[in-house]
């Protein structure tokens, strides 16, 4: 596909460029092996040797031994280190010796489940032993669903399918639940924030049904590197977990470059767009025939980079050789892209973090990140997508204008020496807990002595009884409602419904091309929005908000759209409060009203604003939790109202970029907003709120660490090269020293 010499030349050329502000070489590492266990079935031993596996890595052997000893485990090793064998080996060995044994595999996405099924079935076919392994998801044909329920030794699914299609219909899965010996949860680190809090409750329901049918399964979990894998696994499963982190896998040499785009406006310290330089770098590698992945943070940015790359390399490879990969694509489309990456027909892919996960997507040699992914754990996951065959690889992180990106360029040691972040979940969030208690009651009636996690649930069950959802009879709570509860509970977003995207370009061939959650649709699918899909531009002709359908038509324009939201907060209840000199910090329940206001048209080539328009959508309201900073309003009068408001905006921008680092959450999980005069205190206030009804514990975590957040913001400001403020820190204003204003205000808060 490419010559080694050309790859070495490209690395040397890149390392010499002035925009490369840091170059880290991660050395190769030799494998550390362990012998096969004596209890391993001879047929499995022979088949592994046929596949070129003559011994196990140390972590694979440790995992096997702990599982054989009845322990629940979490295996934590880097990408492409053979974690799959940590669970497949003990599970298949057990089924070979006991044909009645069953296992349930959970993967966070359908795509990853399909990938793992293919790998497992190849091995089973080679063994020539009657083991039935199937995926059970929304794409599974009805004709084989009954066979899976009755005879599936290994059922591979995702949390959404387990939640809505397996647990509510457990009477059809008696064979699985009666003999369930293992529950495998892969990519554990993805179960954090809202999604993880939901999945922890799905696991509670799963364990409850397993106990009803007389089984007590072991948990085998695997994770990328995070700070608290054991704690996360124990919170998610409700079981005591043994940590396996003795990584014996080899590693190829990896070059890691931090690339800072050049300054194009010295007075304002404005740098060239990270998207533009990511496109330029990817083009260089693709033209050499080097298979490359480009990560971008948003769906829109993915499509913008893709359209540029397709134009640049279509003469060499053809337009279809460069593909986009993101949420919202239909399953068949995603699988074709994965297959193309493996067989080499797809030379490059531009992706959101959807491809962070451990799918086998071929021999990618270069990874380009458009901006800092937001956490150390996520950065290493993306970096691990290059060099998956233990060969030399290159990772380039192209810094954006965001404060945290520029902080990385000034302090690369923060990334290369710091430990990964903690992953947090809050399964007992009242809104989430109530949703899953409804689902659990539908599956089996609750008894008075029964528990469901840590919280006392009898009061909640009594409340649901009063609401007519449950009916209490003879010491048990029974489901009474007509509705099917699981269908109304979304595991992955604050909104319970997705908006379907309907392409009506050709009237005779109207088709669904994707979907989007409701909150994202407010800013990306409003009327006149430009929706990008695989590099093709569609204009939204109509958004039917009641029916949740967006009707689009293909267009060819030189711009894309971005939208603004108006946010207003009202404090409902103060749970915690402390003075901080002249300032104060608080935590409690808030009501948040959200309304999209206007959209901007941004030129594709330069990202400059070329037009705008209003958005006509109804106001949305959520009740959630927030932490907040109440500020002394003395500066409001000494420096002027407008100046003080700019300082509040500057601090909000800093917090917005730092919060995901503190909480290891998605950027959409915690939002930042400010008010010059908050209703509850009539003081200037900056709010950090969970963007989920009821909250998920992230705002509470931030309240406890508000001083650290302020200290890091000051550090980040000091590290910025600008003199008066710039897009890389607090924004720019030609009439104000924004940096000085924000620094003055932050230093007055810091104890």
Image: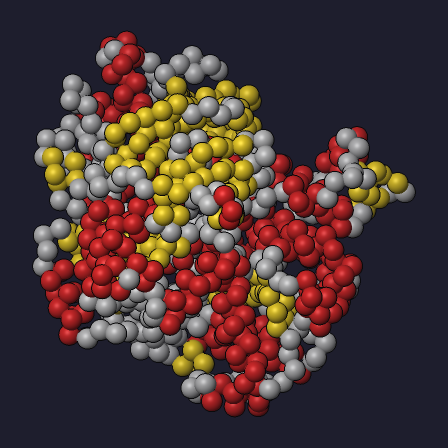
Query: Looking at the image, is 298 positioned above or below residue 542?
Result: below
Q: Nearer the viewer, residue 54 or 389?
A: 389
Q: Nearer the viewer, residue 426 or 562?
A: 562
In the image, taking residue 497 as reference, residue 617 lies left or right, namely left
Q: Which residue is drawn at 40% across and 55% down?
A: 325
Query: Looking at the image, is 680 positioned above or below residue 68?
Result: above
Query: Looking at the image, is 457 positioned above or below residue 186?
Result: above
Q: Which residue is drawn at 64% across and 52% down?
A: 163
Query: Which of the 4 image quadrants contains residue 725?
Result: top left
Location of residue 682 in the rendering, given as x and y in whole percent from the top left corner: 42, 12
Query: Looking at the image, is 569 positioned above or below residue 91?
Result: above
User: Is residue 245 visible in this depiction of the protein?
Assistant: yes
Query: Which of the 4 image quadrants contains residue 206?
Result: bottom right
Residue furthest front as drawn:
508
In the image, taking residue 398 as reference, residue 338 lies left or right, namely right
Location of residue 614 in the rendering, given as x and y in whole percent from the top left corner: 39, 23
Q: Residue at x 72, y 76 (%)?
A: 100
Quadrant in which the C terminus is drawn = top left
Q: Nearer the viewer, residue 351 or 268?
A: 351
Location of residue 71 in the rendering, given as x and y in whole percent from the top left corner: 59, 68
Structure colour scheme:
secondary structure
């Amino acid at each position: 596909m490419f010559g080694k010499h050309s790859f070495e030349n490209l690395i040397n050329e890149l390392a010499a460029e002035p925009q490369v502000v840091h170059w880290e070489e991660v050395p190769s590492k030799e494998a550390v092996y362990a012998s096969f266990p004596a209890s391993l079935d001879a047929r499995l031993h022979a088949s592994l040797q046929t596949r070129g596996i003559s011994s196990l890595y140390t972590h694979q052997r440790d995992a096997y031994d702990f599982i054989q000893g009845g322990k629940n485990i979490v295996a934590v090793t880097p990408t492409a280190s053979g974690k799959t064998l940590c669970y497949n080996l003990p599970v298949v060995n057990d089924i070979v010796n006991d044909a009645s044994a069953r296992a349930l595999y959970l993967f966070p996405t359908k795509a990853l489940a399909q990938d793992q099924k293919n790998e497992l079935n190849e091995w089973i076919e080679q063994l020539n032993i009657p083991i039935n392994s199937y995926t059970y998801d929304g794409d599974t044909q009805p004709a084989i669903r009954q066979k899976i329920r009755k005879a599936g030794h290994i059922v591979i699914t995702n949390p959404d399918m387990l939640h809505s299609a397996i647990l509510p219909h457990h009477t059809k899965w008696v064979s699985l639940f009666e003999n369930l010996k293992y529950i495998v949860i892969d990519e554990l680190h993805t179960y954090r924030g809202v999604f993880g809090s939901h999945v922890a409750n799905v696991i509670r329901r799963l364990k409850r049904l397993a106990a009803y049918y007389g089984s007590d399964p072991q948990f085998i979990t695997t994770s990328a590197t995070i700070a608290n894998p054991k704690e996360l696994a124990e919170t998610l499963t409700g079981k005591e977990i043994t940590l396996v982190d003795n990584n014996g896998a080899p590693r190829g040499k990896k070059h890691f470059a931090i690339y800072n785009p050049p300054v194009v406006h010295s007075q304002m310290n404005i740098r060239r767009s990270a998207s533009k330089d990511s496109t330029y770098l990817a083009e260089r590698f693709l033209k050499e025939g080097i298979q490359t992945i480009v990560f971008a943070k948003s769906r829109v940015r993915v499509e913008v980079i893709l359209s540029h790359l397709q134009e640049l390399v279509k003469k060499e490879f053809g337009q279809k050789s460069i593909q986009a990969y993101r949420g919202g694509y239909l399953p068949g489309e995603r699988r074709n892209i994965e297959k193309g990456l493996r067989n080499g027909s797809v030379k490059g892919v531009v992706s959101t973090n959807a491809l962070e996960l451990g799918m086998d997507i071929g021999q990618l040699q270069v990874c380009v990140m458009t901006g800092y992914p937001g956490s150390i754990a996520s950065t290493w996951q993306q970096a691990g997508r290059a060099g998956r065959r233990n060969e030399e690889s290159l990772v380039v992180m192209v810094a954006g204008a965001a404060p945290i990106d520029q902080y990385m360029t000034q302090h690369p040691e923060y990334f290369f020496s710091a430990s990964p972040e903690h992953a947090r979940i809050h399964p007992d969030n009242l809104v989430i807990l109530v949703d899953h208690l409804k689902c659990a009651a539908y599956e089996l009636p609750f008894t008075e002595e029964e528990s469901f996690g840590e919280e006392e649930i009898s009061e909640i069950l009594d409340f649901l009884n009063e609401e007519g959802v449950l009916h209490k009879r003879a010491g048990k709570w029974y489901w009474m409602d007509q509705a099917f509860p699981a269908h109304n509970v979304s595991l992955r977003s604050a909104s319970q419904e997705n908006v379907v995207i309907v392409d009506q370009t050709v009237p005779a061939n109207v088709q669904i091309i994707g979907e989007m959650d409701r909150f994202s649709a407010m800013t990306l699918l409003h009327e006149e929005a430009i929706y990008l899909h695989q590099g093709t531009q569609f204009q939204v002709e109509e958004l039917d908000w009641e029916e949740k359908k967006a009707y689009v038509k293909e267009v060819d324009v030189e711009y894309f759209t971005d939208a603004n939201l108006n946010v207003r907060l009202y404090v409902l209840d103060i749970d915690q409060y402390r003075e901080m000199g002249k300032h104060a910090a608080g935590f409690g329940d808030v009501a948040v009203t959200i309304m999209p206001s206007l959209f901007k048209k941004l030129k594709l080539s330069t990202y400059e604003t070329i037009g705008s328009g209003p958005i006509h959508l109804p106001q949305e309201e959520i009740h959630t939790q927030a932490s907040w900073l109440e500020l002394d309003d003395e500066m409001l009068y000494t420096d002027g109202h407008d100046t003080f408001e700019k300082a509040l905006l500057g601090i909000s921008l800093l917090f917005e970029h730092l919060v995901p680092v503190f909480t290891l959450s998605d950027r959409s999980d915690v939002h930042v907003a400010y008010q010059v005069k908050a209703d509850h205190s009539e003081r200037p206030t900056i709010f950090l709120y969970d963007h989920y009804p009821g909250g998920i514990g992230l705002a509470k975590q931030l309240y406890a660490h508000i001083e650290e957040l302020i200290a890091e913001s000051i550090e980040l400001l000091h590290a910025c090269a600008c003199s008066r403020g710039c897009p890389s820190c607090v924004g720019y204003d030609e009439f104000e020293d924004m940096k000085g204003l924000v620094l003055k205000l932050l230093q007055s808060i810091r104890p």
